[in-house]
Image (tube, rainbow, N blue to C red):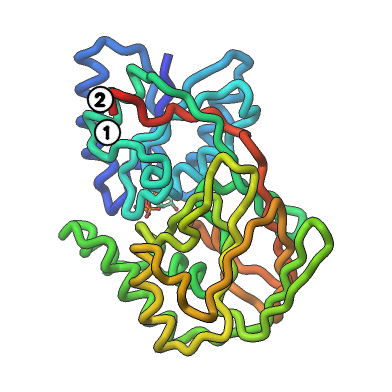
Amino acid sequence: MYYFIVNPGSRSGNGKYVWQKAERILDQEDVEYRVYFTAYRTHATELAAEITARTERLTLIAVGGDGTVNEVINGIRDFSRVTLGYIPTGSSNDFARCMGLPTDTEAAVQNILHPTHFDKIDLGLMELGGQKRYFAVSCGCGFDAAVCHEALHSRIKNLLNRLHLGKLTYVGIALKQLVLCKPGSATITLSNGKSKTYSKAYFVSGMNCHCEGGGLKLAPHADIHDGFLDIFVVNRLGKLLIALMLPTAYAGFHTIFPGVHIFRARSAEVAVTGTLPLHTDGETCLMEDTVKMACCPQSLTLIAAGKNA
Ligand SMILES: Nc1ncnc2c1ncn2[C@@H]1O[C@H](COP(=O)(O)OP(=O)(O)OP(=O)(O)O)[C@@H](O)[C@H]1O
């Protein structure tokens, strides 16, 4: 039995059409399944909690974007009893990109129905004011979170998604947020007690995957199996240089810029001044003072891209 959680609103309504195609394949192959549709923000978390409250082992399939994956993993009661599958239907699909999962619906469904390879992957864990939240791709505060926040509420995103130009949403919003954002102090303390202060930080991200924001390879060597987060910091870099640096991140060449810092950490505490936007897998909130990011090694079993993918 497969349990599907579908976000029909992902990529501005694309999720609904992807699911219709997936459903035809499931019915043709006479697969036993149950499907649950999300209707609002956090609904996927509630559904995942409800489904995984049962005691048996089960296969849960998320159908949506990175935000849906995030909501689903945050609802799973006991990772050891769940195998997660994923059919990407989002705007960015960074988790699928990182895992090499098929984005074509037919291939993605076949990969789930006929798995050849299961993968134990790390998850990130963000702790903020007593609240904990898992992330699959990345967690970040500052500039990148401000971009995510605006993209989440953007009407232009809907329009560009319909024109298959969803990536442009992030480019446009990133330029606008770059003009608006003010760098601030960020002190990062690692689990070994060592700390470093960046006096003019634009953003700090904990990368579980190597890319975010629709393929920006911010941490080109991040490995979802290594038990570490790659901490990515942009500090003391002029805004014009940041605007030049970001596109080079699609190829991973941004690391040559002097204000770009990347280092590995099992966990890191990030202390900032003032109130900053914060995101986990593109889902946003506000933070003050301190946020903790940690890697939870080999937490989740995923249906990986197999030979049939
Ligand atoms: N029925 C729905 N209609 C609209 N939005 C929904 C619905 N159900 C859930 N959501 C919300 O949609 C938001 C975006 O979902 P998701 O991240 O899956 O897609 P996306 O933004 O298109 O993709 P990506 O994160 O890969 O860019 C999430 O915050 C989710 O809570």
Q: Is residue 168 above or below residue 227?
A: below
Q: Which mark is residue 158?
A: none
Residue in front for this viewpoint, 266 or 49: 266
Task: List x then y, in percent, for residue 96.
Answer: 38, 43
Residue in front for this viewpoint, 172 or 24: 172
Could you say whether the residue bearing mark 1 is in a helix, strand or loop? helix
**Could you tell whether 73 is left or right of 163 in the image?**
right
Q: Residue, x 38% and y 19% (percent of image)?
A: 116
**Could you tell whether 168 is left or right of 188 in the image?**
left
Q: Is residue 5 above or below residue 127?
A: above
Task: List x then y, in percent, for residue 232.
Answer: 56, 66
Could you say whether the residue bearing mark 2 is in a helix, strand or loop? helix
Neighbour class for label 1 at 10 Å: few (<14), some, many (≥20)?
many
Quadrant hosting residue 268 = bottom right
Q: Is residue 182 above or below residue 153?
A: below
Quadrant hosting residue 160 = bottom left
Quadrant hosting residue 39 = top left
**Could you tell whether 21 is left or right of 236 in the image?**
left
Quadrant assignment for the C terminus:
top left
Residue linked to disc 1: 19
The amino acid type, in three-letter code, at marker 2 is Glu
Q: Is residue 202 above or below residue 52?
A: below
Residue linked to disc 2: 23
Mark pair 1, 2: CA separation? 6 Å
The amino acid type, in three-letter code, at marker 1 is Trp
Task: List x then y, in percent, for residue 52.
Answer: 57, 25
Q: Residue, x 19% and y 14% (percent of image)?
A: 28
